[in-house]
Amino acid sequence: MIVIVTGSAGYIGGQTMLVLKDAGHEVYGIDFRQPPEHLRGVPDGFLYQDFASDAALSWIIQKQPNAIIHCAGTSLVGPSVKNPSEYYNNNVAKTLKLLDIVKQSMPRCRLVFSSSAATYGEPIMNPIHEVDPKEPVSPYGESKLMIDMMLESYHRAYGTDYVSFRYFNACGADPEGRHGQEPGATHLIARFLEATRDDGQFSIYGDNYPTADGTCVRDYVHVDDIARAHALALYHKIPAGVYNLGSNQGFSVKQVIEAAGTITGKMPFVSTEARRAGDPPELTASPTKFDMVVGAWRHHNLDAMIQHAWNWYVRQDKKV
Ligand code: UFG
């Protein structure tokens, strides 16, 4: 298949390109950021442009892809509260442009979208099912939910074909060490491992939540499993719609850092700070809807997520 990946210089877009190339597809990347050195040469072609620019949209039409995997977007909860304009423009307005060219010029192209658990806000019940209330608590979550709604409206009205994945907590790195998270990422495993590697300090954001050990519980998903889910979504036997990508297995912050300490054999200095605004105590996914369609798609457990990420961080350090 011919597949275009937007946001291809990023963490999830980059891993998706690797998995698609491994599977033998013809893959094109598009990103306004230069691809990191380790991703150069992976796709069959790369356009250094904003995906919603006129030049990029013409380039996409000219390629006539079977699918577009749309990972581009701004994706941090906290900054979205301070600067919502960036999120509605970058995520919603630009994706609408992409949707319109798909509708007009590529009606058979499948759009696979990177949505988020942030669309659910603070759930009343865990695990969260796709049909549960969606009450995002940040402009980031709102922007992702708006796009999910646009995709469904276009599907109903114009037959636009789509799959939207609501990722829970993406983590880990390429199992073969070819790609991983960029330095300075703010996510738990990334921060903890960088602090471990650099003999630095790590802060737990709150230990007085209503959970078993007082720290927040999340559903961690290996980036390689997420990328493989995107590859599966190229096939139209997966009905159009929204799917959670998670495992219904929650781990607390303390459980994650304990597992990481065992794998790395060392610990950074750990302190406990105040809660971070907007963190729900628990977020776990019901993955049943996607499981029912594709069968087993998760191949990596929490230890593998941490081990692969650790391999990546150690390797990056050696290159410096
Ligand atoms: N945490 C710490 N210390 C850190 C970093 C994180 O204690 O240095 C804690 C957070 O408070 C949270 C947990 O680790 O309890 C996980 O935090 P992350 O930042 O790794 O991930 P989030 O759960 O905040 O973010 C995820 C997705 C987002 C999505 C959000 C919805 O990455 O895309 O869930 O709540 F929007």
Image: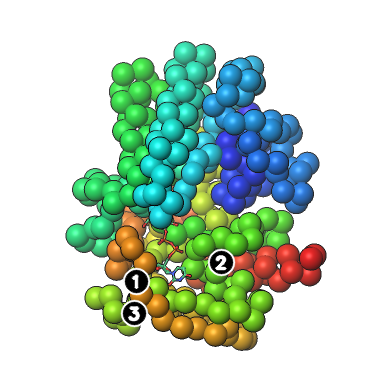
Q: Residue at x 67, y 68 (%)?
A: 313
Give the CA distance from mark 1 to mark 2.
19 Å
Q: Which image quadrant for residue 63?
A: top right
The label nearer to you, 1 versus 2, is: 1
The label nearer to you, 3 versus 1, is: 1
Residue 72 in the image: x percent, y percent?
53, 39
> Disc 2 marks which amino acid?
Ala
Give the CA distance from mark 3 to mark 1.
8 Å
- Ligand 1 within 8 angstroms of badge 2 C-beta: yes
Q: Is residue 289 visible?
A: no
* Vertical position of residue 104 compared to residue 69: above or below: above
- Ligand 1 within 8 angstroms of badge 3 C-beta: no
Q: Residue at x 60, y 75 (%)?
A: 195
Q: Earlier in the sequence, mark 1 or mark 2?
A: 2
Secondary structure found at label 1: loop
Which residue lies under the disc numbered 2?
190
Tags 3 and 1 touching, CB below 8 Å? no
Apparent side of residue 145 relative to residue 111 in the rendered image (left or right): left
Total labels: the figure holds 3
Secondary structure found at label 2: helix
Q: Is residue 190 visible?
A: yes
Which residue lies under the disc numbered 1?
275
Q: Residue at x 70, y 61 (%)?
A: 177
The 10 Å Cα crowd at callout 2, few under 14, some 14 to 19, many 20 or more, is many
Apparent side of residue 301 relative to residue 123 in the rendered image (left or right): right
Residue 207 tag number: 3
* Vertical position of residue 122 compared to residue 67: above or below: below
* Vertical position of residue 205 compared to residue 183: above or below: below
- Ligand 1 within 8 angstroms of badge 1 C-beta: yes
Question: Residue farthest to the top?
Answer: 104
Taking depth in this image into account, of 1 and 41 the one nearest to the observer is 41
Taking depth in this image into account, of 62 and 318 the one nearest to the observer is 318
